[in-house]
Image (cartoon, helix red, strand yellow):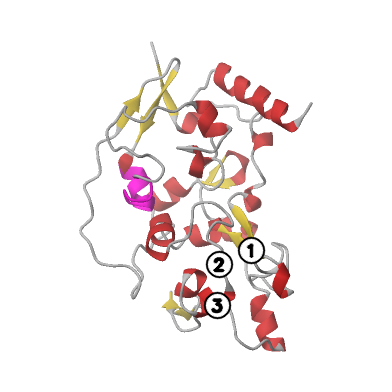
Amino acid sequence: MAPIQKLLSAFIIALTVPVSASAADYSHYLRHIPPAENFGQVVLDNYSHKAGVLPVTFDHWLHRAKFTCRLCHIDIGFAMKAEMTEISAADNMSGYYCGACHDGKRVFDGRNIFGSCAENYTEDEGKRCARCHSSAEAEERKYDYKSFSEKLPKLPGNLIDWEKAESEGKVKLTDFLEGVSYKREPLKAQDDFTIKIRSWDVIFSHRKHTVWNGCELCHPMIFPSTKRGTTKYSMFQIMMKGEYCGVCHTSVAFSVWLCAKCHITLVE
């Protein structure tokens, strides 16, 4: 069976199999989710191979434990799709993108953040370059998913439960970067609401999303309107095309295959 046919079959199953929020059996769905250590991993190779170095392997899970999504994708300006930002070494050395933090001077949690790029390539510089320009398994990398996540709450598939980790204070999020962000009054989040569908309703929480995204990461780029019911979308668009909720929940936030995380209330 062709890959697209397999995905379509899985999509149809996901729509027809009842979901139990109290005792969800995800064994059938977990095969559609990448290994936890690779979930949210982005390979950046706009210029790396041309420059004779390995691509950058970026792990969202490492940065999510420290910074909000809004800070990186709004204030710093990373695009929401891989390879769309077209980051160059010159950009980083000028203090843009990765270089906004990785300049060798900025201090976080009492430690200097290593510089991202260098004008002159030396043996010592090469070791530092390999912290990013390397495979996820390279020994130059200073962390691994297993040890990093062992004390954090988990979802099925060994994925980190970021919502629970934040609410329990196990991760402390930074949402302001001196010299990059601007001080502003937070917008009042709308109340939680129900999205009516045919079987299991979705309970959507603005409060839980704004902790990570603010308002401006979702509106107007992903959801053009802020008025409930104005934007129409389907599970096919979310799961198969990566649109709307699927922009994050097919690649970085908890997977769309964990159905009971959203579809909570049974329609009588």
Q: In the rendered structure, which amino acid carries the disc numbered 2?
A: Ile
Which quadrant of the rendered structure holds the C terminus? top left
Q: Is there CB contact under 8 Å for labels 2 and 1?
A: yes
- In the image, taking residue 209 as reference, residue 116 lies left or right, namely right
Q: Nearer the viewer, residue 233 or 65?
A: 233
Q: Is residue 137 above or below residue 241?
A: below
- Indicate whether 74 appears above or below 143: above
The disc labelled 3 sits on which kind of residue?
Answer: Ala
Residue 265 in the image: x percent, y percent? 39, 22
Q: Nearer the viewer, residue 8 or 113?
A: 8
Residue drawn 41% across the image and 19% down it: 197
State how far apart marks 2 and 1 are (Cα): 7 Å
- Label 1 residue SS: loop
Count how many numbered circles sit on residues in the image: 3
Q: Residue at x 57, y 16 (%)?
A: 16
Who comes first in sequence, dot 2 or dot 1?
Answer: 1
Kindly identify which residue carries mark 2.
87
Q: Secondary structure at mark 2?
A: loop
Q: Quadrant of residue 184?
A: bottom left
Report the residue marked by disc 1: 46
Q: Which residue bears the numbered disc 3?
A: 90
Q: Is residue 96 above or below residue 65?
A: below
Q: Does residue 16 belong to the magenta stretch?
A: no
Q: Which residues are magenta?
A: 207-219
CA gap between label 3 and label 1 equals 13 Å
Crowding near pointer 1: few (<14 within 10 Å), some, many (20+)? some
Q: Name which residue lies at 55% across and 20% down.
A: 15
